[in-house]
Image (cartoon, helix red, strand yellow):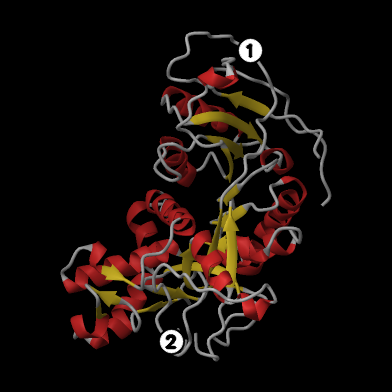
């Protein structure tokens, strides 16, 4: 790495007396025939999660940066129903060996349209894998509590074997208990005549409370993806209210903007989406975002070598991506939901899977220590890469003589340096 390239490395790994509605599933092995129906209202122990690392930067000499509360008392009555209330008592040797320890996933705004698409993707194994059992902990409001029960019923009827527990509540201190992933979707939409400052304040209060709840009861290594808008500022408010959780574990969702940018470039170039890579969204999830075509590639070539219409790139492309959400609302009558849920899935997969060599993805991250000259102490979208723990340990051994841990020994498996770090 050149001496001028500074890397910002983000680590991603995955007491309330209030009552909750707990809907707990079957713990089944494939061979068990002993079925003991036992109602219970306790969560399973927190599993040990695997840690991953995210390096949220690309070397600056490679990238051409475009210019551009208090806790309230119990709110719900304990209630359990359906298959998620049943526990089948299995002998230790009957437990399936192929599945991993269950992970706790909290979702706010769980009765909304985005969640209506997302929850079933999570439960199916599409996100965390076909051998990863999960518990879904769903946060709603007093107004949406009955709808949450409907969501739980649909999850129940879908017979997902990996979905072991479901709980619903309107208290974030209950929902975030032991959470290893928190997907924060719930936010108040901007109404007619509402000033932006008013919206920031209203949603800021929601995310301040949720940040305090995460800080109090979630796993210390919880990964937080903020979707509710304005997501960059909401993520900042949330992380500021959760000082015991590393700021680098918070992400504002800009993956939908990246996906939209890839779509526009693919359409213009006449290629399929998988040919487009290295797309970055800089800045805020708003119409001021900067979709970066200067560093993007199509089939391995710089975009400007494939798309010769540079005026389109500088004008129409930028505007199409920036205003895509507004155009969709005019056509559809509501904001995007299905494509947003897909982008949440993409974002999670990017955080838990090593990034393909030479590529990167976009995420809104805390800017302290960034190498681009971006103001510190904000959440700003920039290029990120995921590295495996094994790779980081190998790099650590290589620089042991510089960290006071003995003689350096390099056994790096392959070259995975970001472009410009050579």
Point out the frontmost of discs 2 and 1. 1
Tell me which corner region of the image, top left, top right, bottom left or bottom right, holds residue 318: bottom left
The CA distance from mark 2 to mark 1 is 60 Å
Compared with 95, 301 (above or below) is: below
**Residue 249 in sight here:** yes
Q: Looking at the rendered structure, which numbered label has been put on residue 174? A: none
Q: Decide which of 14, 82 is in the foreground and name it.
A: 14
Query: In the visual, does 198 lie left or right of 5?
Result: right
In the rendered view of the protein, which quadrant contains the C terminus? bottom left
Tell me which corner region of the image, top left, top right, bottom left or bottom right, holds residue 247: bottom right
Q: Looking at the rendered structure, which numbered label has been put on residue 38? A: 1
Query: In the visual, does 358 lie left or right of 215?
Result: left
Q: Decide which of 76, 212 is in the foreground and name it.
A: 212
Q: Residue at x 39, y 51 (%)?
A: 342
Judging from the image, what secondary structure is the residue with disc 2 in?
Answer: loop
Q: Residue at x 65, y 15 (%)?
A: 39
Compared with 209, 290 (above or below) is: below
* Disc 2 target residue: 66
Compared with 51, 317 (above or below) is: below
């Amino acid at each position: 790495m050149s001496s001028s390239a500074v890397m910002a490395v983000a680590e991603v790994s995955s007491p309330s007396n209030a009552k909750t509605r707990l809907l707990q599933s079957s713990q089944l092995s494939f061979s068990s025939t002993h079925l003991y129906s036992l109602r219970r209202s306790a969560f399973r122990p927190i599993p040990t999660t695997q840690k991953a690392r995210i390096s949220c930067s690309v070397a600056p000499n490679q990238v051409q940066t475009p210019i551009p509360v208090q806790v309230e008392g119990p709110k719900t009555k304990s209630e359990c129903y359906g298959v998620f209330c049943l526990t089948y008592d299995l002998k230790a040797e009957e437990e399936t060996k192929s599945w991993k320890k269950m992970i706790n996933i909290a979702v706010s705004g769980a009765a909304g349209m985005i969640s209506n698409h997302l929850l079933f993707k999570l439960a199916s194994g599409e996100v965390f894998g076909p051998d990863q059992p999960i518990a879904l902990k769903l946060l709603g409001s007093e107004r949406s509590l009955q709808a949450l029960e409907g969501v739980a019923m649909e999850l129940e009827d879908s017979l997902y074997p990996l979905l072991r527990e479901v709980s619903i509540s309107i208290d974030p201190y209950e929902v975030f208990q032991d959470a290893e992933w928190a997907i924060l979707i719930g936010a108040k939409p901007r109404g007619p005549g509402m000033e932006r400052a008013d919206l920031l304040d209203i949603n800021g209060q929601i995310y301040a409370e949720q940040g305090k709840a995460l800080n109090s009861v979630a796993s210390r290594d919880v990964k937080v993806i903020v979707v509710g808008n304005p997501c960059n500022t909401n993520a900042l408010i949330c992380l500021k209210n959760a000082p015991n959780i590393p700021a680098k574990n918070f992400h504002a969702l800009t993956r939908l903007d990246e996906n939209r940018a890839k779509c526009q470039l693919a359409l213009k170039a006449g290629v399929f989406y998988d040919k487009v890579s290295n797309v970055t969204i800089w800045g805020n999830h708003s119409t001021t975002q900067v979709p970066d075509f200067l560093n993007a590639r199509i089939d391995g070539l710089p975009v400007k070598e494939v798309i010769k219409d540079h005026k389109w790139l500088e004008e129409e492309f930028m505007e199409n991506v920036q205003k895509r959400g507004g155009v969709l609302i005019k056509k559809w009558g509501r904001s995007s939901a299905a494509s947003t849920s897909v982008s949440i899935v993409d974002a999670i997969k990017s955080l838990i899977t090593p990034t393909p060599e030479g590529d990167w993805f976009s995420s809104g991250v805390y800017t302290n220590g960034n190498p681009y000259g971006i103001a510190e102490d904000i959440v700003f979208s920039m290029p990120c890469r995921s590295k495996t723990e094994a790779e980081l340990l190998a790099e650590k051994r290589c620089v042991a003589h510089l960290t006071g841990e003995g003689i350096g020994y390099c056994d790096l498996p392959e070259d995975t340096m970001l472009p410009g770090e050579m």
